[in-house]
Image (spheres, helix red, strand yellow):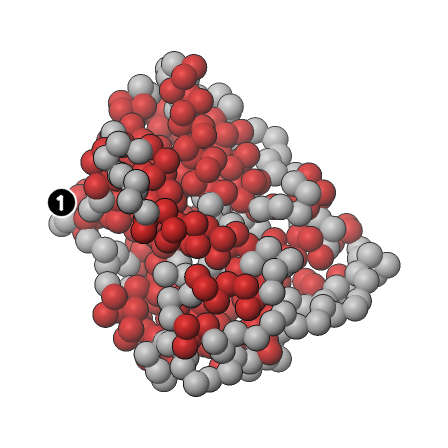
């Protein structure tokens, strides 16, 4: 896997990804500042947490913020999402669809079950390299359902629920992912992150010690970690004074919404996968899932990474006996999986990377329409080389 990362780094920007001796572009510095820090810290502050002093020495301080006040120009009617979750889905039993306004290009459930069987019988579900976008296309944008059928539904009994209830829950997750037809943050992203999290966890001492019930809860968190995403990032929500930013006080805006959406889906008739759990276990699963989803907020990434390294280096670190140590390691699995396309074969990684670029461009288009500053990497007239450079963030500084 490390070799794949090095190869992808070299193909993306003509080096091994360390960036030694190079200065980052102004656009890239703004991108990292707005997405990988809380916006209140200077990038120099993270140098002690970096993978190598030489790589991080290229990071200058934050750029000056653009002095444009968007409030006077903002047409709030143009904001596409106002609440974390709308009305309850109309029919949990209905055939999953590919989005509210798109035609049904969907294969039957038999195709989903068939693809799931292939994943299981071929061993593909246990292989790090899984072409989730290919699965996404073969199943008519239902890779999440096929993957869940192979990894999550068979474990429904572990949480005290039924296959039927688990399928209903997963179907509603899928429906919420597909409402906005995002190029990147869509049901296929949820599928690949769940698969990668599961793959990493099953090779861990932390999973051995935590018990199968929390394995399944971790897979649920991975499936739900971006549910309801509408193709805009936290910086957009804050800049646009989005209703979600007001609800969550500009802190982990989307991550809080994803977590809330996950548990609101459970309140939908027939979707409560925790209904049979004891009060104590329900609290345990909720805390586990919420903490995992909130850990995907990249604004706190460097703080998390620093604390993790200090903890792992300490003599008291113990995955077998310390639940908090197991939790922090499990957070690492989900965080790594969330950016894990950088460790896939280059052709798969490239497809994901340019899907992300398209989503950035769509955000920039809306920001321009709203009259607010266009976020880093979201300007269509920008140099694609800047985007290639930006991929150093998940490859170099996240590990």
Image quarter for residue 18? Answer: bottom left
The answer to whether residue 354 is seen in the rendering is no
Picture layout, residue 288 above or below residue 162: below
Q: Secondary structure at mark 1?
A: helix
Left/right placement of residue 35 relative to residue 374 reads left
> Residue placed at 61% from the left, 38% from the top?
84
- Location of residue 327 in the rendering, given as x and y in whole percent from the top left corner: 36, 38
> Residue placed at 37% from the left, 17% from the top?
277
Picture layout, residue 298 above or below residue 61: above
- Location of residue 103 in the rendering, given as x and y in whole percent from the top left corner: 49, 50
Image quarter for residue 131? Answer: bottom left
Picture layout, residue 308 above or below residue 319: below
- Location of residue 29 in the rendering, given as x and y in whole percent from the top left corner: 57, 72
Which image quarter holds the C terminus?
Answer: bottom left
Which image quarter holds the N terminus?
Answer: bottom left
**Neighbour tally class for label 1: few under 14, some 14-19, many 20 plus, Cα within 10 Å:** few
């Amino acid at each position: 896997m490390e070799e794949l990362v090095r190869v992808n780094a070299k193909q993306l920007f003509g080096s091994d990804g360390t960036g030694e001796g190079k200065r980052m572009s102004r656009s890239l510095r703004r991108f990292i500042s707005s997405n990988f820090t809380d916006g209140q810290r200077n990038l120099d502050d993270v140098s002690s947490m970096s993978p190598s002093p030489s790589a991080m020495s290229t990071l200058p301080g934050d750029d000056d913020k653009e002095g444009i006040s968007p409030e006077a120009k903002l047409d709030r009617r143009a904001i596409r999402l106002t609440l974390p979750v709308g009305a309850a889905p109309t029919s949990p039993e209905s055939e999953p669809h590919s989005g509210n306004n798109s035609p049904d290009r969907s294969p039957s459930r038999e195709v989903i079950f068939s693809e799931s069987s292939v994943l299981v019988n071929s061993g593909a579900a246990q292989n790090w390299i899984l072409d989730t976008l290919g699965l996404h296309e073969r199943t008519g944008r239902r890779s999440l359902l096929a993957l869940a059928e192979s990894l999550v539904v068979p474990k429904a009994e572990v949480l005290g629920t039924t296959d039927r209830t688990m399928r209903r829950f997963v179907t509603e997750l899928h429906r919420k992912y597909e409402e906005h037809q995002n190029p990147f943050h869509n049901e296929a992203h949820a599928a690949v992150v769940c698969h990668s999290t599961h793959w990493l966890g099953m090779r861990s001492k932390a999973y051995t010690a935590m018990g199968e019930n929390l394995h399944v809860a971790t897979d649920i968190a991975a499936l739900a970690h971006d549910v309801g995403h509408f193709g805009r990032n936290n910086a957009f929500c804050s800049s646009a004074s989005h209703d979600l930013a007001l609800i969550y006080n500009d802190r982990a805006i989307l991550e809080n919404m994803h977590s809330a959406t996950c548990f609101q889906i459970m309140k939908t008739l027939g979707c409560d996968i925790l209904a049979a759990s004891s009060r104590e276990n329900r609290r345990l699963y909720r805390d586990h899932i919420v903490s995992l989803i909130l850990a995907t907020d990249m604004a706190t990434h460097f703080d998390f990474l620093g604390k993790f390294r200090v903890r792992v280096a300490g003599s008291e670190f113990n995955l077998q006996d310390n639940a908090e140590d197991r939790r922090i390691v499990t957070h690492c699995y989900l965080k790594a999986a969330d950016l894990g396309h950088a460790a896939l074969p280059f052709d798969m990684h490239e497809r994901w990377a340019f899907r992300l670029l398209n989503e950035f461009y769509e955000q920039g288009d809306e920001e321009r329409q709203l009259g607010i500053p266009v976020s880093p990497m979201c300007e269509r007239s920008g140099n694609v080389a800047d985007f290639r450079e930006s991929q150093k963030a998940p490859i170099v500084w996240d590990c």
